[in-house]
Image (spheres, helix red, strand yellow):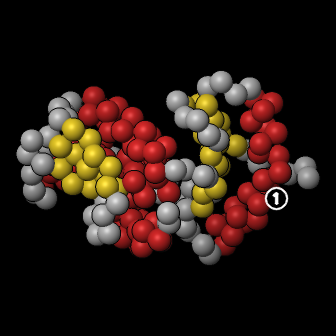
Amino acid sequence: MNINIPIKICRKKVKNLSLKIDPMGNVTVTAPFFLSLSEINNWIQPKKKWIFKNINRLNGIDQNNIEISNFTRNEAKAKIIEYVKESSIITQTTINKIYISSAKTRWGTCSSKGNVRINWKLINAPDEILQYVIFHELCHLKHPNHSRQFWAEVSKYDPQYKIHRKWLKENGHKLQKAG
């Protein structure tokens, strides 16, 4: 099938390939550094019809995240820990410990001791949603409340936090059913 779809390839320290279509219809393949471009293309090729069908669906009525990935909880944990560490450098916050949770009602929490807890099911959300939750929790290390100062701090790192927060409220129940 010869369908021309722009696909962004993002190389990271991961073990498996994953493909994500964000709510705007952008397609991203996350791939390990060691795979060649031809190996990645061979993996993508049989999925092009599915990708095309779902981009068309997104352009119609369905604005949900779609992901094909076989993330295990351990792979999710590794990715989330990496994101939290990178984000703590950006926000200039000090973290004591990072925990991965499977809480039913919370996407993330933090403590005054610098412990950060992120729900592993966020791995099934678009990256910007996971990043929003992480920034949200790290900003609580500076402002342990939801004051104007807190939200101003969040907006420094995620100017679209209101959109991401709304997405999570509308779609979070679907993530909780995953895994």
107, 164: nearer the viewer: 107
Residue 142 quadrant: top left
Instruction: Please state if 77 lies on the left or on the right of 151 as rendered.
Output: right
Q: Which residue is most to the right? A: 1
Residue 135 quadrant: top left
12 above or below 50?
Answer: above
Q: Position of residue 9 (x, y in %)?
A: 65, 36
User: What residue is shown at x 14% (from left), y 40% (from top)?
Assistant: 114
Q: Position of residue 31 (x, y in %)?
A: 63, 35
The residue type indicated by label 1 comes to: Lys
Q: Position of residue 16 (x, y in %)?
A: 62, 40
Instruction: Please state if 1 lies on the left or on the right of 116 as rendered.
Output: right
Q: How many marks?
A: 1
Identify the residue position indicated by label 1 in the image. 49
User: What residue is shown at x 22% (from left), y 45% (from top)?
Assistant: 116
158, 169: nearer the viewer: 169
Residue 58 quadrant: bottom right
User: What residue is shown at x 77% (from left), y 45% (from top)?
Assistant: 44
Q: Is residue 156 in view?
A: no
166, 65: nearer the viewer: 65
Where disc 1 sits, the SS reads: helix
User: What residue is shown at x 64% (from left), y 49% (from top)?
Assistant: 19
Query: How dense is the environment of label 1, judged by Cα within 10 Å: few (below 14), some, or many (20 and up)?
Result: some
158 above or below 31?
Answer: below
131, 99: nearer the viewer: 99
163 above or below 71?
Answer: below
Q: Is residue 16 in view?
A: yes
Q: Position of residue 166 (x, y in %)?
A: 37, 67
Instruction: Please state if 45 lies on the left or on the right of 175 as rendered.
Output: right
